[in-house]
């Protein structure tokens, strides 16, 4: 009979015995506080088996995203394939697929899954496109884009987040993503123009450099509005003559787009 294990964890009670104490009547003989602390540490630090979140990811797509009329099959496939739980702090891994944003540290968040999918669909990414993301965060939106376009360039203003996201994306095999720590308001001039630009933090006005770096026929999706208030998620398109068409899609609330002081 298989040994008992911590739910969702791969460390058995017998392994716990070998590491942390002796067994007596089927229980580890260790101080209660120490045992509780060690159990919590094990659950937080040991990743679950690779497929243990697959059902949660499928529910996320079917109940939160498809049910709200996101239809693009390529976007839905990307949302099903990228392991969102690996882009959040380990303490929040079991809520990674819930219908709300999550804190990722440094006052930043990973967006609600529906918003990620909606912004991606609005941008209409093509397989041969080059995409710019402003506001890397944990790297989740960049990972989604990487499954849909040829190249992704992503900028994060906070060095700890940017550096960690770069390591995470590399370790997970997202080889067509380039990460820069810098001022996203200014875009990525030397890599422009871009077919797709996604901004995951809200400026009060659309940054002119991003409009300049948007290719003719390109799409920019960006939340715009007052800091710490309701903003408007905008879809901005540039036609072949360079004219700008802006549409307000829905009210949202994002963290503010910050700049170097």
Image (tube, rainbow, N blue to C red):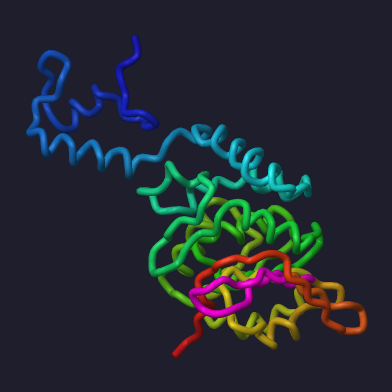
Q: Position of residue 92 (x, y in %)?
A: 40, 48
Classified by dominant secondary structure, the portion drawn in magenta counts as: strand
The residue under the point 83% across, 81% down is 244
Q: Position of residue 198 (x, y in %)?
A: 67, 69
Q: Tell me if residue 260 comes above or below residue 40 in the rendering.
A: below
Q: Tell me if residue 222 comes above or below residue 141 in the rendering.
A: below
Inspect the magenta stretch and tell me whether residue 256 lies in it. no
The residue under the point 42% across, 36% down is 48
Please indicate whether residue 58 sits to the left or right of residue 218 in the image: left
Q: Nearer the viewer, residue 18 or 229?
A: 229
Bounds of the magenta segment: 219-234
Quadrant hosting residue 261: bottom left
Q: Nearer the viewer, residue 202 or 16?
A: 202
Inspect the magenta stretch and tell me whether residue 228 lies in it. yes
Q: Tell me if residue 118 comes above or below residue 53 in the rendering.
A: below
Q: Tell me if residue 179 comes above or below residue 243 in the rendering.
A: above
Q: Nearer the viewer, residue 61 or 180?
A: 61
The residue under the point 9% across, 30% down is 30
């Amino acid at each position: 009979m298989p040994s008992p294990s911590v739910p969702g964890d791969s460390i058995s009670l017998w392994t716990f015995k070998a590491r942390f104490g002796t067994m007596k009547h089927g229980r580890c003989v260790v101080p209660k506080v120490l045992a509780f602390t060690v159990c919590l540490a094990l659950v937080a630090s040991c990743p679950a088996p690779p497929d243990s979140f697959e059902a949660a990811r499928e529910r996320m797509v079917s109940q939160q995203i498809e049910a709200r009329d996101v239809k693009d099959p390529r976007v839905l496939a990307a949302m099903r394939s990228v392991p969102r739980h690996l882009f959040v702090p380990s303490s929040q891994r079991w809520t990674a697929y819930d219908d709300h944003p999550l804190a990722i540290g440094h006052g930043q968040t990973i967006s609600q899954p529906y918003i990620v999918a909606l912004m991606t669909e609005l941008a209409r990414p093509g397989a041969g496109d080059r995409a710019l993301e402003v506001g890397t965060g944990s790297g989740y939106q960049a990972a989604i884009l990487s499954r849909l376009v040829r190249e992704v360039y992503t900028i994060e203003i906070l060095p700890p987040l940017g550096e960690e996201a770069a390591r995470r994306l590399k370790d997970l095999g997202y080889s067509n993503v380039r990460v820069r720590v810098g001022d996203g308001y200014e875009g990525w001039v030397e890599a422009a123009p871009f077919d797709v630009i996604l901004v995951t933090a809200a400026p009060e006005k659309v940054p002119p450099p991003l409009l300049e770096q948007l290719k003719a026929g390109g799409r920019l999706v960006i939340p715009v509005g007052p800091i710490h208030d309701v903003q408007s998620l905008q879809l901005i398109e540039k036609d072949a003559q360079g004219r700008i068409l802006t549409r307000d899609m829905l009210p949202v609330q994002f963290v503010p787009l910050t700049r170097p002081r």
